[in-house]
Structure formats: structure tokens, C-alpha cells
Image: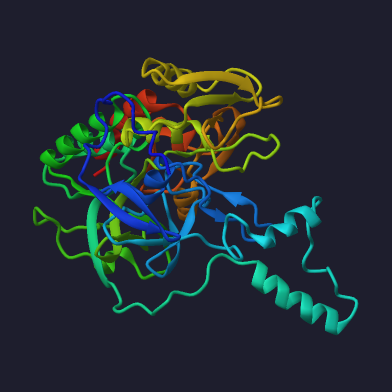
Amino acid sequence: MADDLRDLPTVAGATPPEPDVRFDFDGQAVTARAGEPIGVALFAAGLRLLARSPKYHRPRGLFCLDGHCGSCFVRVDGQPNLRACMTPARAGLVCERQNAFPDADVDLLRAADWLFPDGMDHHRLMTGTRLGNDLFVKLVRQMGGTGTLPDAPASEIPDMRSATADVCVVGGGPAGLAAARALTEARPGSRVILIDEQSAPGGSWLAEAGGPERGRTLAAAVAHAGAEVWLSSTAIAYYPEDGDARELATRDLVGRESMASDGPPGILAVVTPTGLVKLAARRFLYATGAYDQNLPFPDNDRPGILSARACGRLVFRWGVRPGRRLVALAGDGALPEYAARLMESLRELGIDVSVAAAASPPRVNLKRDAVAVLALPAPASELPRQHGAEVRLDPERGGFAVTIDPRFATTVPGIFAAGDVTGYVGCEAAFAAGKAAGLALAATL
């Protein structure tokens, strides 16, 4: 394995290098920097095939590098379906590829992709006889699915606890960080909790030149102002029926009765490094950003084809070159505002970047080079929608965007939103919206 993708000049703001560690990947020793995701270490070592798809056994690799696309599931230390882009490397870790026989490189089950080029309806195939159907179902069970059961049951059940806050901000990107700082400074003494699923603050800034450092600086200012910043913590669902939020309240940090009658019912379930938290709050502000999307072109799911912002995360967060050459594919119309800026930032680092139309992609050696998809990100609106917040379809801003009024309030009392979740706007506009939303929300407390 040639580790030839870490030769970039020092990138300002990138995660500082840690001492090297070695882990096992399908019997091969791989060198990584301690704490970086195993997916980044494998990509830097030239190992791009991470898994096979559940049904047709097509090759899979990194795509978004943000924990959202489900394209990089691997088995780690006997635990299936962990995201390679979110699981930190450490000495002695054992990583295996999934959904392949006998292995991912020569997977015989990939014949399904060749046998059924127009798709397979496994619900109706071979249903003419009971015997034929029984045999086929057994075969499908062996070929399909994602991973196998863990090697051993969990040794302990993580703790669960309850927490209350005046305001819960979900999302630690430009909008969320700006909102949390404005809130805390406008309402000193209020308990503000900011939640983000990444191990570092910054959100979409993590894919931009200087963004990681900007995220760290603003998160430190947020904490200094008095807010709590929960990193590596994922808000998984809102449960309106899980008791009344007011039942969880006692008194807040300054002795006032917390969770007054204006607080929404129910709880937000948050998975943290130490266990599940049932969080109730008087106000929720969603700054969940937007998801990276793909474009329609042949074989757009191959390893080595990444979202444009994934290329930015590789370079500006982790200091890894996406390839010797980078071909950026654009759809119809003008490029999203982030795309042109990102491509220029990569060129300034000496990366060979060219732009082509997705309708007629050029031939690319995906073992050495990479393809960046310049698609418009889609608003991450699921959690506000669970509260009942109205969304609207706005294709020019990425998809289903949360509806807000001029004060950043959604259609549900106590629920606010700002940034790309209200329709893709980009980092700087999201930062400005977050600051304004924080001040507007503070006025309602």
C-alpha cells in the first residue's frame, strides 16, 4: 500500500497530526494518525473499497465523510455496521469489510448485479413452486442484509439520564454556533446546550479552507459565554408522547422555575459518548444544516466518487489529498456557491482540479484519482418535522426546507430553525442567520 495522499502543504486549521498507530484491515496492517477516522486512514493508504451493497453487492466506499450516506459501513472489533468515516482509529483495532463472499475484492455474490441489470424483484422471483421459493429465500438471506450479528453481546448497557435546558441548539455548524453564542450573551444565566454529532465543531466549515479553526474558535467562545457544547452527540429522535417535558423539570441554573408552560412537551433523545440523554427544553433551535447529494450519471456509486464537501473535509480537516487528480462533476445550471470557492481553494494547494458535466463524465482512474460531485446540499429537516414543523419543497434551495417566519420561528410553538435547514444558503449566510435567530429566540424567554 502506498501512503501517497498526505503530501499536501500544511493546511491552516486542519486537525493537528497525532502519533501514528497501526490497525488491522482484513489482515493488512494500516498506519493511521490516532483519532482520525479509519475511513480517512484507509483512503490515504489507497484502500477505497470498504464494503459491498446489501442487495446487488456493488462496491462501496466513502462518499460524504460526514456520517450521513451509509456508504462506508464496516465491522470493527466484532461490531457490525459502524461508519468508517466516524469511527476513530486506534492501536490494535480490527476492521473488516462486510457483505461479501469470500471477500470484498473478489465477491462472488456480485453476480447479482450482472444477472439483474434492470433490477431484481426478490418478492416475486421464483414464487411458482414452494420448493423453489424456499431455496431462493435461503439464497437471498445469504446474499442480502447488512452485516452479521456481533461476535459477542454488549458487556454493559449504557447509562440513561434526563436533562433540562432553557434552549437546546441542535447543530454545531455556522448557524448553531452563532445562535448559541448570541443566546448565551443575550440571556446570561440561561442553560443553553449545543449538540453536534461530529467530534469537532464547525459543521459545513469543516469542508472549507480555514473552517476547522474557525469552528474551534467560535465553539470556545460559546463555552466561555456559558453554553454547554456536547460533541460526538447525536440527536436521534423527538418523542412528544414520552411524558410531559415539564415533568422532568425542577429548577434551572439561576433558581427560576424551568420549563414553564410555554415549553413544548416530550423529549429529544440524544446519544452521547456516555449514554442516552432524555433532553427537555423550553425552546429548540434546529441548525442541522444540509446533506451532501449525488448527481445522476452512470456508476455514480463507485468508490472514489465523493461529494465535493467530502473532498473539502479530507483536505481541510484531515490534511489528506483526495487524489492525484480531481475531476469535479457539475449538473445543469450554475454551480452551488460553495462549489466554485471550494474548487479554487483546492487548486491553491496544488491539487489538479478540472470541472466537467455530469451528463458526459470523462474517464477517471478511480484507484489514483477522484471524482467530486458538485450537487446542491439538501436540508436536514427530519427533526423539526418530527415536532410537526411545516416544510416546503424548494428545489432551488436543495429540497424540503423548514418554513420559518421573520423571527426564525417554525409553525410549531417553541421550535425555531436557522441556516441551511431552512433551505441551503451557505456558510456565511447561515452564520448571519444563526446570530439573528439566537437574538430573536432570546427575546421569547
- Outermost residue, bottom direction? 131
* Drawn side of residue 119 relative to residue 95, left or right: right
Residue 440, picture quadrant: top left
- Outermost residue, left direction? 254
The colour mode here is rainbow
Q: 379 or 323, which is in the foreground? A: 323
* Drawn side of residue 335 relative to residue 13, left or right: right
Q: Position of residue 407 (x, y in %)?
A: 37, 33
**Which quarter of the rendering shows the C terminus?**
top left
Would you place residue 439 above or below residue 135 in this image? above
Q: 257 or 308, which is in the foreground? A: 308
Q: Position of residue 363 (x, y in %)?
A: 66, 28
Would you place residue 322 above or below residue 348 in this image? below
Q: Residue at x 48, y 43 (%)?
A: 380
Would you place residue 98 above or below residue 444 in this image? below
Q: Residue at x 53, y 62 (%)?
A: 98
Q: Position of residue 92 (x, y in %)?
A: 29, 62
Residue 125, picture quadrant: bottom right
Q: Position of residue 309 (x, y in %)?
A: 45, 32
Q: Residue at x 14, y 61 (%)?
A: 251
Residue 249 is at least partly visible in this image: yes
